[in-house]
Amino acid sequence: MRRNLLTLLTALLLLTSIATAALWVRSHRVGELLMHDAFKSDALPYVLTSTWLYLDSGGVGFIRTRSVCSANSPAEAREWFELYFRDHPPGWTRNRHDPWGYPKVNSTAAPAFDHLGVVVSREPWPGMGGQNHPCFRAVVPFWLLVALPAVPALVAARRRWRSRTRLRAGRCVACGYDLRATPGRCPECGKGVLASR
């Protein structure tokens, strides 16, 4: 039962890795953007919270911004918010975009974490009327999303191959000790031969 469960898990991890690789190849032709807007627009201050999930040639990204327009904001910012609320219903929308680096965050702030293509940062997002709004951004490269599920699957495949090779050669599956002289039980680790088959 346990072996069947591990085999199923290994197959699922490999399928996940293959599906991610297919998305990676596709992302070089077209990018995907899934955006969710939620806003409070009944009275000032107006609050717009946007969440973006996107696929592009760089990987999978997540951006969350919160824009606030108060009575002290410039008139053009208030107009922009009122038009945006009128023309865009709240909820999810899906768009396609240029796959080479959209959306851009024009910021001079260094990311909190930037290693091997993984980026996590809090930075100002340029908004209407010259205002900057707080923005959280996280990006994970496709190569990492392909490699991570594949590692446990490859380790399981290697173990299975090693145990089958040892069993055919007359060695203990657990430790590799030669069992030709003691076929019933391994004298090195004590594991029964029949239990290991």
Image (spheres, rainbow, N blue to C red):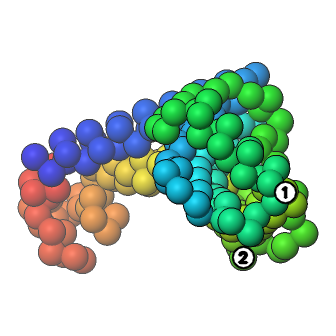
Q: Give x and y (percent) for residue 166.
A: 34, 52
Label drawn at residue 19 = none
Residue 140 in sight here: no
Give the amino acid type for the residue marked by disc 2 in the picture: Ala
Is residue 54 rendered to the left or right of residue 56? Answer: left
Label drawn at residue 112 = 2
Q: Earlier in the sequence, mark 2 or mark 1?
A: 2
Is residue 72 rendered to the left or right of residue 191? Answer: right
Give the structural element (helix, strand or loop) at label 1: helix
Q: Give the camera-side residue of 150 and 99.
A: 99
Q: Name the residue furthest right.
A: 108
Residue drawn at (57%, 28%), measured in percent from left and top? Answer: 94
- Residue at numbered disc 1: 129
Position of residue 67 relative to residue 188, above or below, is above
Q: Give the camera-side residue of 15 and 85.
A: 85
Residue drawn at (82%, 50%), measured in percent from left and top? Answer: 76
Position of residue 136 relative to residue 42, above or below, is below
Q: Give x and y (percent) for residue 189.
A: 22, 76
Q: Number of callouts in the render?
A: 2
Give the structural element (helix, strand or loop) at label 2: loop
Give the amino acid type for the residue marked by disc 1 in the picture: Gly
Q: Give x and y (percent) for residue 63.
A: 63, 54
Position of residue 111 relative to residue 106, above or below, is below
Residue drawn at (49%, 51%), measured in percent from left and top? Answer: 42
